[in-house]
Amino acid sequence: MAENNQFDLKKRITAAKQTRKITRTMQLIASSRLQRGKMQLAHSQVWKKHMRKAMSCLSDSYFERTGRPEADRKNAYIIFGGSKGLSGSYSPSLLQYAKPIVEGQMLIAVGSAAEAFFPDAHSLLGDKAPSVDYAQTITQAARTLYESNAVSAIYMIYAQGTRHVTEQLLPLARPEEEQNDSAIIEPSAPVLYPVLYKEYTQALVHEAHLKAYVAEQIARVTAMDSATRNADEIIENLQVTYNRIRQSSITQEIIAVGNAAKGDG
């Protein structure tokens, strides 16, 4: 019986060590992604700052909504839900926050968690790390809805740190920078302004995705660290039990040998 208990305990200890190895590896991967995401976010904010200054040259038409009455149209929401699993309550809490806000509206779901939670979303965009190319894909999906007058406005829902944020994307809000009427426009305003408008919109999406990505990696590091410490505790408790049973088994064997020796004597 003791041998069976020892065998079962050894199997459980081995399984717990394998789990600890996986969670520790995932923690290190998430930590690396977190640092990379923070650097990308810092760079994107510098780029966005320069873009805001350039956007101050644009006419009011780029910041106003035209089309049929607002009451006739829905809004669209870009939801940066992250990937499924291994990040604790990150995705579930964000998606529960979003659920009452987006009810009856059009959705662009970014990430497998958002895809699974909103399978009927207008656009389902999978798990990809933030990049300029992916921001372009997301922005294009949003602008198609907006410029076709299918929706009144576009909003983004994402996590920033431990907060959940709802931010308007389109129509764009005019940057607070003072308008620069003396700016020299090259090659010309009709050519440059649409490009600025497109690039700035894309920069806002990229920044929101990076903020969401950083928050997700923080949650994943925390979750994997907790899982690793739990595995350590389980291994320690199992090892103590295994050692106690093993010592008891050895003691019983010694007693049995001693009794046998007495009987022979």
Image (cartoon, helix red, strand yellow):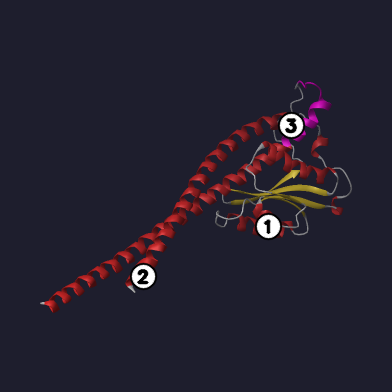
Q: Position of residue 7 (x, y in %)?
A: 37, 66
**Amino acid type, mark 3:** Met
- Vertical placement of 241 versus 83: above or below? below
Say which element carries label 1.
Answer: helix
Q: Residue at x 38, y 63 (%)?
A: 10
Separation of residues labelled 3 and 2 (CA atoms): 71 Å
Q: Which residue is mark 3?
A: 55
Q: Residue furthest bottom?
A: 263
Q: Kindly indicate the quadrant of the structure image that contains residue 8.
A: bottom left
Q: Which residue is mark 2?
A: 5
In the picture provided, is 159 more to the left or to the right than 137?
left
Q: Residue furthest right?
A: 68
**228 and 37: which one is in front?**
228
Q: Earlier in the sequence, mark 1 or mark 2?
A: 2
Q: Position of residue 179 (x, y in %)?
A: 74, 29
Q: Position of residue 12 (x, y in %)?
A: 41, 63
Q: Which residues are magenta?
A: 184-200
Q: Residue at x 82, y 26 (%)?
A: 191
- Vertical placement of 217 versus 44: above or below? below
Report the quarter where the N terminus lies.
Answer: bottom left
Q: Nearer the viewer, mark 1 or mark 2?
A: 2
Report the quarter where the C terminus lies.
Answer: bottom left
Q: Residue 236: within the magenta?
A: no
Q: Residue at x 61, y 58 (%)?
A: 92
In the picture provided, is 103 more to the left or to the right than 15?
right
- Vertical placement of 61 versus 263: above or below? above
**Amino acid type, mark 1:** Ala
In the picture provided, is 214 more to the left or to the right than 177?
left
Q: Which residue is mark 1?
A: 116
